[in-house]
Image (cartoon, rainbow, N blue to C red):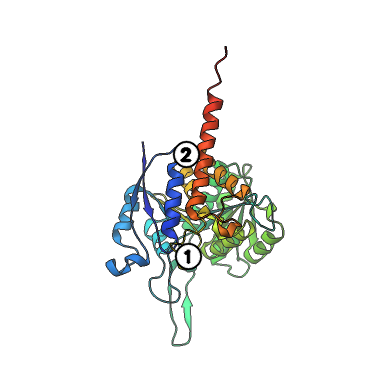
């Protein structure tokens, strides 16, 4: 049975990345029915908003979506399509793996981190206002319910994926009530996994230094919204940058998968952009839909193409276009399927 999935191409380079990713996912051996809906700057004139109601309705109906990057205006205008999606759909967990890829220039080898970021509150709750003409105030919201929920998500992920440790990241030494409550909540949840998953905590500024010095000491990190946003980009920098960083936003009723980089409008339509992050986000979606073997095949094909360095995009040191890079991944998927079929069907003997 085919999975019906909402596909949001996005802005700038988004449509090219979405098409490349769609072709790779269609070649994974899993059947999809794509419901394409538009959001972002391109629909502002028509709907008066970058996030029309029918987009939310599509995701709610299908429960799964994959989207390209969407432009967020700086300083004015619509706050953020991404933040609005997370809050409107209750996508409380932001999942950001950061794993080294052979053939990709980086200062580190064998980094394998998973960032679990609380997605609905903290300073991103959007409770801010002017205090007179020359000052502004933002209110930081931390609740026990949301903190325990993201902590449990991190521990459950660790158990399901054979990880060894969860580290809670905070600033409870200074923000003793808000971050103190987050840390207390993580400790409460950790007690339910004692003996199965190791638990520790780190102050966020020290955590950033530790990740730069010795990322191999860490495994799954769980963080409030703002720290998670910052540390997940740092982790992406350890493995080659945002161009190879997949992401997922997961709730109890829906999940949206997306690359975490921007829409790069100056490269739109040039067939130059690197689709790795969106394709790997598609692999996360395959796992979410219950197809871990297909996800592994896609991830392996991406890694092989990058390691070979022949059909990579300009940012990865190659000269291939977006579509040619996707073609190479699809070729690897086809070759892998052929090899598996050969192995499964021994040659007849005389």
Q: Looking at the image, tell me whether mark 1 or mark 2 is earlier in sequence order.
A: 1
Q: Residues within 10 Å of mark 2 (few under 14, many from 20)?
A: some
Residue 8 point in image, percent of width and height: 38, 56
How far apart in space, not on screen, are marks 1 and 2 (Cα)? 33 Å
Q: Residues within 10 Å of mark 1 (few under 14, many from 20)?
A: few
Disc 1 element: helix
**Disc nearest the viewer among 1 and 2:** 1
Q: Nearer the viewer, residue 165 or 42?
A: 42
**To which quarter of the image does residue 125 belong?**
bottom left
Position of residue 210 relative to residue 307, above or below, is: below
Residue most extreme to the left: 46
- Taking the image as shown, residue 89 lies to the left or right of residue 284, namely left
Q: How many marks?
A: 2
Q: Nearer the viewer, residue 300 or 292?
A: 300
Residue 341 point in image, percent of width and height: 52, 28
Residue 210 point in image, percent of width and height: 69, 60
Say whether residue 247 is visible.
no
- Tell me, for residue 275, which label it has, or none: none
| Residue labelled with disc 1 | 267
Q: Nearer the viewer, residue 284 or 340?
A: 340
Position of residue 137 relative to residue 141, above or below, is: below
Residue most extreme to the bottom: 133
| Residue labelled with disc 2 | 291
Residue 11 point in image, percent of width and height: 41, 63
> Residue at the spot x=61%, y=62% of the render?
234
């Amino acid at each position: 049975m085919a999975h019906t999935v909402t596909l949001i191409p996005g802005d700038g380079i988004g449509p090219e990345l979405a098409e490349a990713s769609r072709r790779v996912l269609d070649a994974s051996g899993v059947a999809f029915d794509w419901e394409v809906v538009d959001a972002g700057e391109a629909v502002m004139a028509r709907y008066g908003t970058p996030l029309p109601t029918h987009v939310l309705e599509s995701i709610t109906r299908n429960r799964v979506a994959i989207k390209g990057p969407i432009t967020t205006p700086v300083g004015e205008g619509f706050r953020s399509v991404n933040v609005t999606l997370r809050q409107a759909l209750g996508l409380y967990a932001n999942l950001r793996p950061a794993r080294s890829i052979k053939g990709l220039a980086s200062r580190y080898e064998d980094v394998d981190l998973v960032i679990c970021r609380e997605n609905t509150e903290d300073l991103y709750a959007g409770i801010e206002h002017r205090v007179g003409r020359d000052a502004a105030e933002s209110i930081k919201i931390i609740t026990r319910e949301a903190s325990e929920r993201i902590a449990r998500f991190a521990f459950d992920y660790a158990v399901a994926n054979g990880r060894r440790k969860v580290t809670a990241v905070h600033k409870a030494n200074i923000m003793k009530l808000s971050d103190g409550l987050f840390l207390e909540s993580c400790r409460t949840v950790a007690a339910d996994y004692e003996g199965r998953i190791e638990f520790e905590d780190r102050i966020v500024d020290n955590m950033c230094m530790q990740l730069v010095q010795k990322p191999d000491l860490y495994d799954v990190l769980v963080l409030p919204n703002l720290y998670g946003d910052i540390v997940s980009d740092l982790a992406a920098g350890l493995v080659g940058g945002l161009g190879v960083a997949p992401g997922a936003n997961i709730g109890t009723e829906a999940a949206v998968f997306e690359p975490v980089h921007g829409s790069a409008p100056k490269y739109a339509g040039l067939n130059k952009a690197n689709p790795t992050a969106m394709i790997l986000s598609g692999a996360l979606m395959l796992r979410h839909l219950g197809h871990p073997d297909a996800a592994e095949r896609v991830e392996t094909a991406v890694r092989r193409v990058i390691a070979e360095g022949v059909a990579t995009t300009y940012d990865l040191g190659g000269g291939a276009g977006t579509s040619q890079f996707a073609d190479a991944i699809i070729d690897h998927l086809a070759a892998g399927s052929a090899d598996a079929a050969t192995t499964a069907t021994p040659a007849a003997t005389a």
